[in-house]
Image: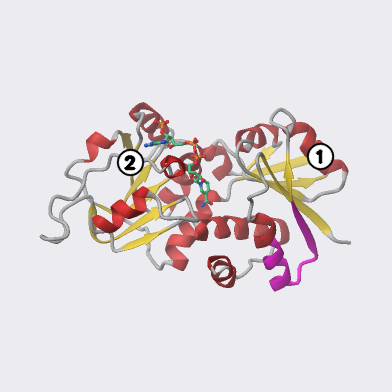
Amino acid sequence: MTDRYAVIGNPIAHSKSPQIHQMFAEQTGEDIRYEAIESPPDGFAATIERLREAGYKGCNVTVPFKFNAFKIATELSERARAAEAVNTLSFAGDTILGDNTDGAGLVRDIEQNLGISLQDKKVLLMGAGGASYGVVLPLLTAGAALSIANRTPERAVELAKKFASSSVRGGGYADLTGSQFDVIINATSAGLTDSKIPLPASPLFPKGGQGGIFAQGSLAYDMMYGRETPFMAFARANGAAIVVDGLGMLIEQAAEAFYIWRGVRPETAPVIAALRA
Ligand code: NAP
């Protein structure tokens, strides 16, 4: 019998997840069906109940329900507990297992697809919202020395404090003057409104070479995908060597969910290529 899965969000019509999981299923020969389901804002628990009663095996959860999913899970993975958010639910009897694959997806895209090791790299994570919460533990586990900067600095400080690690600190953008990073990740929603992030511009680039916030050979990573954001344009103009969007992360977090559910890791390169095309 075909196993059923879904992604739950609101809105959800734009979601690429059904297409991605369909490609994974074709590639691996797994017999699954995966659909997008819009839940009413106050009806998430009822939607999950309906899916479980109908025999669904699990679901992905996206905006604005990741915290609801965290609350509804009866068991949580370590990374979901650290993220305080869940994007992958697995149903087995009375158990609802909550996991968060966003951070693993980001790290895999950077390390495997882009070939950049995070071990001992100076990494700046911009933003202290849901997306940032999801990626701090996986970035630290990958060996990054992490600075978190946020428009509201207190939120970045609070996020950093949750991790008993000397490799993470939080603050505001004003604290970044004079600092250089190997990897800068935009986990803010500034791109949605085409807003600029107040990063210090490089005084030397391009005439005098490096010297600004982007270290030589650095990576600028925007979690948003689908279009050039002001952050990506800033990175190109201020010395970043590699500038990428978050499509790879989206596909890698989906692959990690597929692996949790099916025990098979799909190849992501052909799916990334297909969606880029
Ligand atoms: P969120 O919880 O609403 O947090 C938004 C964050 O952005 C906050 O830290 C906020 O700062 C900051 N921010 C908003 N406007 C800003 C501006 N003009 N300048 C500077 N900072 C600004 O959102 P989220 O769920 O974390 O999502 C953030 C982004 O990540 C979205 O674009 C989302 O699409 C993307 N994302 C991508 C993937 C993927 O798979 N590629 C996965 C997850 C998320 P304050 O605290 O000061 O308000």
Q: Which residue is drawn at 16% across and 57% down?
A: 205
Q: Which residue is tagged 2? A: 197
On-image quarter of the N terminus:
bottom right
Q: Is residue 109 left or right of residue 22?
A: left
Task: Tell me which amino acid carries mark 1.
Answer: Asp
Q: Residue at x 46, y 45 (%)?
A: 137
Numbered tag placed on residue 136 in the rendering? none
Q: In this view, does 20 lie above or below 188?
A: below
Viewer-nearest residue: 169 or 228: 228
* Highlighted range, magenta: 21-35
Q: Nearer the viewer, mark 2 or mark 1?
A: 2
Q: Is residue 131 left or right of residue 206?
A: right
Q: In which quarter of the image is residue 52?
A: top right
Determine crowd level at label 2: few under 14, some 14-19, many 20+ residues with C-alpha closer than 10 A: some
Cβ of mark 2 under 8 A from ligand 1: yes
On-image quarter of the C terminus:
bottom right
Determine crowd level at label 1: few under 14, some 14-19, many 20+ residues with C-alpha closer than 10 A: few
Can the viewer see residue 144 in this picture? Answer: no
| Circles 2 and 1 in contact, beta carbons < 8 Å | no
Residue 33 location (% of width, % of height): 79, 59
View extreme (left): residue: 208
Q: In which quarter of the image is residue 50?
A: top right
Q: In which quarter of the image is residue 154?
A: top left
Task: Tell me which amino acid carries mark 2.
Answer: Ile
Q: Which residue is tagged 1? A: 94
Q: Which residue is drawn at 61% across and 57% down?
A: 254
Residue 257 location (% of width, % of height): 64, 55
Residue 172 location (% of width, % of height): 29, 33
Mark 2 → mark 1, Cα distance in angstroms: 45 Å
